[in-house]
Amino acid sequence: MLVPKLLARGHQVLALDTIWFGNYLPQHPALTVKEGDVRDVSAADLDGVDAVIHLASVANDPCGDLNPKLTWEVSALGTMQLAEKCVRHGIKRFIYASSGSVYGVKEEPQVTEDLELTPISEYNKTKMIAERVLLSYMDQMVVQIVRPATVCGYSPRMRLDVSVNMLTMQALANKKITVFGGAQVRPNIHIDDITDLYLFLLDRPDVTGIYNAGFENISILDIAQTVSKHLPAEIVVTSSNDPRSYRVNSDKLLATGFKPKKKVEDAIREIIAAVNSGQLADEPRYYNLKWMQHRGLA
């Protein structure tokens, strides 16, 4: 979703990716796709680069716990090495996708950027360390750190292992939604909004530092009930040993002038439309943990 928007704006784009989950990018004269690893970025990769949008990590808690060594190498060490190489090459812009989960479990109803970070998983911990590394480079380049909420909505490289998308697909495939616990709160952001935010930051080098990016804090049960408004599905609530609730307050980001355009309900409608049109099916490659295990990446 991000790369096509960058291309539409007239940017020359180098997309460096492991291609673990496939290549869903369009062919375009201004786009170069290189199969590579953030742990091994070469000097040539950075030649002519004005800005880096760093999205690479072993994404989400279960995948991070699958192979902690890999998680730390990619998400922490890889970020440190990339930042150092960018400074050496004179690159002045660095946008980093951290995670709203770095706060850990908080009781506060408004989780703002100034609260203490208490990460509880390998994934959260590596994000926190990467943030601290990048902040140490703020006197050498513009550093913009985003702490996104859980991303929802349809994209060509789909994720069906995140709450809104997963519950919508359950309803489509089984006419039943299984909710474990249900009271846990998750902050959400539509994929169109998070990709628009990266474009916004590219245009606003004055907006530096750390920003939460999540606009709907909703319980898992409420998400399931919203899905059931659009699909005939039975909701089955079972017990859960996962009490984690994540909330974020994004007033600091809204104060910069950024405005989200979409909601969780838009994401649900889009996924339903994509399945009904044949664009999307329930496949293992859309579940990070399943696919990493299938590919032997653990």
Image (cartoon, helix red, strand yellow):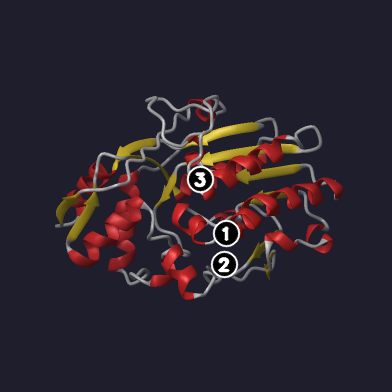
Q: Quadrant of residue 144?
A: top right
Classed neighbour count for the residue bearing mark 3: other residues with Cα under 10 Å, few (<14), some (14–19), many (≥20): many
Which mark sits nearer the N-terminus, 1 or 3? 1
Q: Position of residue 191 (x, y in %)?
A: 46, 50
Residue identified by numbered label 2: 25
Give the residue type at disc 3: Ile
Who is closer to the viewer here, 185 or 261? 185
Q: Do the residues under discs 1 and 2 have CB atoms within 8 angstroms?
A: yes
Q: Nearer the viewer, residue 265 or 188?
A: 188
For label 2, the SS is loop
- Whole-Å distance between the Cαs marked 3 and 2? 18 Å
Q: Amino acid at mark 1?
A: Pro
Query: How many other residues sit within 10 Å of disc 2, few (<14), some (14-19) or many (≥20)?
Result: some
Disc sitting over residue 194 in the figure = 3
Mark-to-mark CA distance, 1 and 2: 8 Å
Q: Is residue 256 above or below residue 153?
A: above
Q: In which image quadrant can residue 275 be found?
A: bottom left
Identify whether 215 is placed above or below 5: above
Q: Is residue 37 visible?
A: yes
Q: Earlier in the sequence, mark 3 or mark 2?
A: 2
Residue annotated with mark 1: 4
Residue 14 visible, this orientation: no
Label annotation for residue 27: none
